């Protein structure tokens, strides 16, 4: 055999090499029509993660709340410093008797005013209420913030205490405590309240409820004590709404005048 017959020319080798390359590169299941495909290799199954316990869920919710609160305060922080003109937040709540009261129940009405020097600052409030039954001075009535602002069928529609952090009573942000009734009225200024007019847990749009009884402040020894303090029936309620500074300024002036008259009276008696 001649050398030319033993060594094919390059023009004949090129197609053969190309076909061999394609056959080697193609998957075996696609190499020949009708060939049985290879069995797929088993893939490792992901292991399910263990369910978090109640403590872990509570910690996650608390952490999420802190982050949301921080973001909200950054978004709503005003340029003015606390105490500067325009920096304070104000709200009002005009109290009316519950629509579901029996005719024999007292008709309590009045006004609750709120002022917050700046988002994140402590809240203060004036409580001016009339219509309590004529009874011995010193009786005490509970006032709380409740979850809903729908009062059309009566104060019962306000729902439970507003409690966004799932804390036990009396540590809800709207647990305002007990108020002494004198001559059928409540006239009280209270500062350092935990509620807020700004932020994700604002009480704006929620209900303030005046109860017929005294709050046991979580010391009643039963589950209801840690929910609502066994404060009794809901006599009156209102929905908190944003307002301007004038009602607060008027109430603050009247409060200062009452304190002055009381001091003068004490001095004369002494």
Image: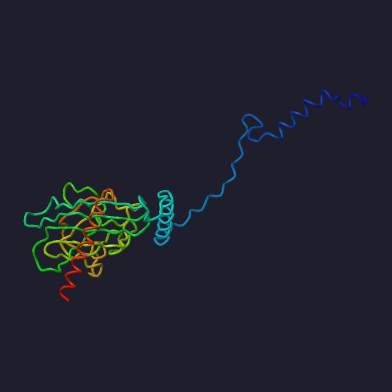
Q: Residue 56, how many percent across, how many down?
A: 43, 60
Instruction: Specify the farthest residue to the left.
Output: 104
Q: Quadrant of residue 3?
A: top right
- Location of the C terminus by quadrant is bottom left
Number of disc labels:
0
Instruction: Specify the farthest residue to the right.
Output: 2
Q: Quadrant of residue 160?
A: bottom left
Q: Colour mode?
A: rainbow
Q: Residue 35, how many percent across, how many down?
A: 63, 33
- Location of the N terminus by quadrant is top right
Q: Quadrant of residue 123?
A: bottom left
Left or right of residue 220: residue 33: right
Foreground residue among 200 and 113: 113
Left or right of residue 118: residue 107: left
Question: Does residue 108 lie above or below 179 as drawn?
Answer: above
Question: Does residue 5 lie above or below 49 as drawn?
Answer: above
Q: Residue 192, how many percent across, how many down?
A: 31, 63
């Amino acid at each position: 055999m001649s050398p030319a017959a033993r060594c094919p020319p390059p023009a004949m080798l090129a197609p053969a090499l190309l076909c061999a390359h394609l056959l080697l590169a193609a998957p075996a299941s696609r190499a020949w029509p009708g060939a049985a495909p290879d069995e797929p290799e088993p893939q490792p199954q992901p292991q399910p993660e263990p369910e978090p316990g109640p403590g872990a869920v509570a910690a996650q919710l608390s952490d999420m709340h802190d982050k949301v609160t921080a973001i909200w305060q950054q978004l709503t922080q005003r340029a003015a410093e606390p105490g500067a003109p325009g920096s304070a937040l104000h709200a009002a709540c005009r109290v009316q008797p519950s629509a579901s009261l029996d005719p024999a129940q007292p008709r309590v009405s009045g006004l609750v005013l709120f002022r917050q020097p700046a988002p994140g600052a402590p809240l203060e409030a004036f409580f001016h209420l009339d219509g309590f039954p004529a009874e011995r001075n010193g009786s005490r009535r509970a006032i709380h913030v409740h979850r809903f602002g729908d009062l059309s069928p009566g104060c019962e529609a306000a729902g439970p205490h507003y409690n966004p952090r799932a804390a036990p009573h009396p540590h809800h942000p709207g647990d305002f405590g007990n108020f002494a009734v004198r001559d059928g009225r409540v006239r009280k200024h209270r500062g350092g309240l935990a509620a807020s007019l700004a932020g994700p847990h604002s009480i704006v749009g929620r209900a303030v409820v005046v109860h017929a009884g005294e709050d046991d402040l979580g010391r009643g020894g039963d589950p209801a004590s840690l929910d609502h303090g066994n404060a009794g029936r809901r006599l009156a309620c209102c929905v908190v709404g944003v307002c301007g500074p004038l009602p607060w300024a008027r109430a603050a002036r009247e409060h200062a005048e009452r304190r002055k008259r009381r001091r003068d009276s004490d001095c004369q008696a002494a």
